[in-house]
Amino acid sequence: MTGILCNDIHSKLNPTRVARLLHPASEAEVVAALKEAARDGMAVSICGARHAMGGQQFGEGTLLLDLCGLTGLGELDRERGTIEAGAGIKWPELIEGLHARQAGEEVVWSIRQKQTGADDLTLGGSLAANIHGRGLNLCPIIGDVEAFTLVDATGEVRRCSRGENAERFRLAIGGYGCFGVITSVCLRLAPRIKMERLVEVTTIDRLLSSLQRRIADGCLFGDFQFSIDERSPDFLCRGVLSSYRPVAPDSEMPDEREELERHHWEELIRLAHDDRAKVFEVYSSFYLRTHGALYWSDTHQLSVYLEDYHAALDHECGAEVPASEMISELYVPRDRLIEFMAAAAERLKDGAVPVIYGTVRLIRCDEESFLAWAREDFACVIFNLHTEHSEAGIATAAEAFRALIDLALSFGGSYFLTYHRWARRDQIERAYPQFAEFLRVKDAHDPDGRFQSEWWRHYRNLFEMP
């Protein structure tokens, strides 16, 4: 069989055989690759660190452009607080580069936010999904973007911002690679500051009032990790609320602090599969011990990610079929969060699809991107559900995710398109009334269908059905 088999790193549910794989190291090489693809009549797909789970980074039979070589750091504007960075740079490299550029400076500019859970995602991939982090008063990453450079379907290089090629700016951020190759990004930064972690164990009915108090007290980041033990009355109710509050600039940072290291995370993941009552006890005990610890506003957003962790779990338990965790992120109006979580707990309490991890965050409204998921100030609820890689296992997980989407929609909410492709057409249309127009605009900008992926093909076919 010819071609190159690719898959996503986390769920491993997107095996796709591409025709060719290129690793462009410059914008000029991206342009050349697109012009060659046009001459050969080939469709092009675009990937970065391969964490996306919805099929947006691969296309069967396509020319795959892996952009991880676009890692250059350009101009750092310390007056305006912006940095030009290659779309293939990963968040730890970006932070390290910013620190190195500003060694000895009293004020150090660094990132405002990044996605949580994994660090080694590319900047371009983050824009393609319009990611968000744990900010308590932040909109998705589109709010952090000053401009970017895009190579379109004809190979033309375009600078896109709110004042130049503004339509493409709105389409490409959160456009899942449908509108071109982002090669470079001008990112808005924030001064790096010292922060104190505040930790408490609370319940979902008190969460929003607690977060409002934390915000009023100056906290900038925070989230709520909830209990995943479906046999407990605490299921999706009791959790650990961590938030981060600025402290005086002259506060002394510790040389060492208690951290969750790789072996701790390995144990937590094992417990999440085998002993979901104990995992909350262990996790909450650790976090409560870190109450009052000091962190930097940028590096506290970094975390440990265990690549291929499920292979060891599968081997240890003698699993007949491999498994992984698929993720979904649901959005509900904040005043409906308590009702949503109670309904979700009722739906998931039979344990047919175990919850392995879950968290609640806040997001501010995105009024800029075309395919905006944060259409109002939502509460964000993230579920990692255990998914066996069998026909029955995938069908069971897909049904659970569709049920959660139905719940979110029933409360006036939405869901994130970046993960699976298991939503029904009516769910997509309710969550994203502009989705059919999104597909039409894609065709207008790319009439030859140069940019293709399994994500785009799925939705194109779904919306062509009567």
Image (tube, rainbow, N blue to C red):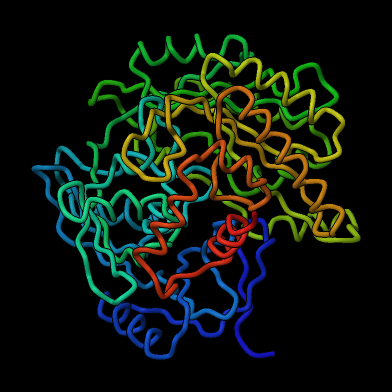
Residue 394: x and y, percent?
79, 53
Relative horizontal placement of residue 138, taking residue 302 as reference (left or right): left
Task: Classify 128 as above or below 206.
Answer: below
Q: Residue at x 61, y 13 (%)?
A: 202
> Which image quarter is the N terminus in?
bottom right
Nearest the viewer among 178 and 91 is 178
Labels in figure, total: 0
Q: Residue at x 43, y 62 (%)?
A: 178
Q: Residue at x 32, y 84 (%)?
A: 35
Is residue 281 in sight in this rendering?
no
Residue that protrudes farthest toward the front in the picture:
466
> Which image quarter is the C terminus in?
bottom right
Is residue 37 in sight in this rendering?
yes
Task: Classify 387 as above or below 12.
Answer: above
Residue 361: x and y, percent?
51, 28
Q: Quadrant of residue 337?
A: top right
Q: Residue at x 32, y 43 (%)?
A: 142
Relative horizontal placement of residue 67, taking residue 261 as reference (left or right): left
Residue 315: x and y, percent?
84, 60
Residue that protrudes farthest toward the left in the picture:
79
Task: Classify 110 as above or below 30.
Answer: above
Residue 270: x and y, percent?
76, 44
Nearest the viewer among 421 and 67 is 421
Relative horizontal placement of residue 309, taking residue 277 as reference (left or right): left
